[in-house]
């Protein structure tokens, strides 16, 4: 069974950092593009980062320079390093294989 | 950025009746490879998003055939032939033709 399990969310102060992880299983992780997508409470979805099979990375302007997506194929794991966090980054963060299979999400709250 | 505009934002439907959601993109979604990466996602209450339709009209694995997608150019439609109670939730269109990937505002499907 294909499964994605996010972890690493929590409460962080504005300006702080957090690293999210996504553990993948049930498929050949290295063969797929991976994404992070977030959703603030009661809001629509917002794409946050993508990484290709070759390690190429893409970001929207809202997080470029602050967030870094990476992958470790040997560990079937995806990461999102988030720096200089702001209140507007508060959301549930989903890991997604391509944009087909989604994890359950991990909550990130940025507040003092 | 490509803006995805959905209508209606709310759709009360009687069980067993059809439902239709429209999505309009602010520019063409034709990728350089000739494909149109327009997808539809369902998010049931308290659940992560789930892919229903990809590349305009292709049902994802396990999606009931009462869901169908159509469209061309910048106008796309998701149809549910006969709404069931389990279809309650929010539906999003999404484009993955061009970075940054973008989502519609969401359409809330509820039972009358």
Image: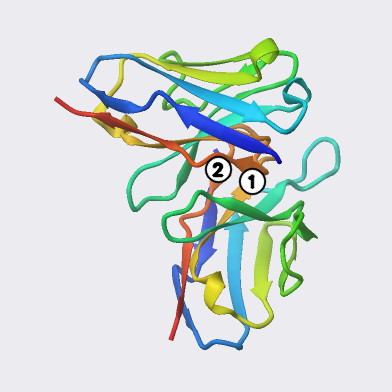
* Separation (CA) of disc 1 from disc 2: 6 Å
Q: Dividing the image into 4 quarters, which one contains the C terminus of chain A?
A: top left
Q: Which residue lies at the image location 64% right of the left edge and 48% below the top edge?
A: B27
Q: Residue A23's x, y, as percent?
A: 58, 25
**Residue that badge 1 annotates:** B95
A67 in relation to B75, above or below: above
Contact? badges 1 and 2 (CB < 8 Å)? yes
**Residue that badge 2 annotates:** B102
Q: Quadrant of residue A38?
A: top left
Q: Work out whether mark 1 precedes mark 2 in sequence or the reverse, and give the earlier one.
A: 1
Q: Residue B64's x, y, as percent?
A: 73, 68
B12 in relation to B94, above or below: below
Q: Chain of mark 1?
A: B
Q: Which residue lies at the image location 55% right of the left edge and 87% below the top edge?
A: B15
Q: Secondary structure at mark 2?
A: strand
Q: Are marks 1 and 2 on the same chain?
A: yes
Q: Residues within 10 Å of mark 1 (few under 14, many from 20)?
A: many
Q: Residue B24's x, y, as percent?
A: 60, 59
Q: Secondary structure at mark 1?
A: strand
- Label at residue B32: none
A14 in relation to B54, above or below: above
Q: Dividing the image into 4 quarters, which one contains the N terminus of chain A?
A: top right
- Residue reaching furthest right? B34
Q: Chain of mark 2?
A: B
Q: Quadrant of residue B57?
A: bottom right
Q: Residue B63's x, y, as percent?
A: 72, 62
Q: Residues within 10 Å of mark 2 (few under 14, many from 20)?
A: many
Q: Which residue lies at the image location 67% right of the left edge and 62% below the top edge?
A: B75
């Amino acid at each position: 069974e294909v499964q994605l399990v996010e972890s690493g969310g929590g409460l962080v102060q504005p300006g702080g950092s957090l690293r999210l992880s996504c553990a993948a299983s049930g498929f050949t992780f290295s063969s797929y593009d991976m994404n992070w997508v977030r959703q603030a409470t009661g809001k629509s979805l917002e794409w946050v980062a993508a990484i290709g099979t070759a390690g190429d990375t893409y970001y929207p302007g809202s997080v470029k320079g602050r967030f870094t997506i990476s992958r470790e194929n040997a560990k079937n794991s995806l990461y999102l390093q988030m720096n200089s966090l702001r209140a507007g980054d508060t959301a549930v963060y989903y890991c997604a294989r391509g944009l087909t299979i989604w994890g359950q999400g991990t909550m990130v709250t940025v507040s003092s | 950025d490509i803006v995805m505009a959905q209508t209606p934002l709310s759709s009360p439907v009687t069980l067993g009746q059809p439902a239709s959601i429209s999505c309009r993109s602010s520019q063409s979604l034709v990728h350089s490879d000739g494909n149109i990466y327009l997808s539809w996602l369902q998010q049931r209450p308290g659940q992560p998003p789930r892919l229903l339709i990809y590349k305009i009209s292709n049902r994802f694995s396990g999606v009931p055939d009462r869901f169908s997608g159509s469209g061309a150019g910048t106008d796309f439609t998701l149809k549910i032939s006969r709404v069931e109670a389990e279809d309650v939730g929010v539906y999003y269109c999404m484009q993955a033709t061009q970075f940054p990937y973008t989502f519609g505002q969401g359409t809330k499907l509820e039972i009358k």
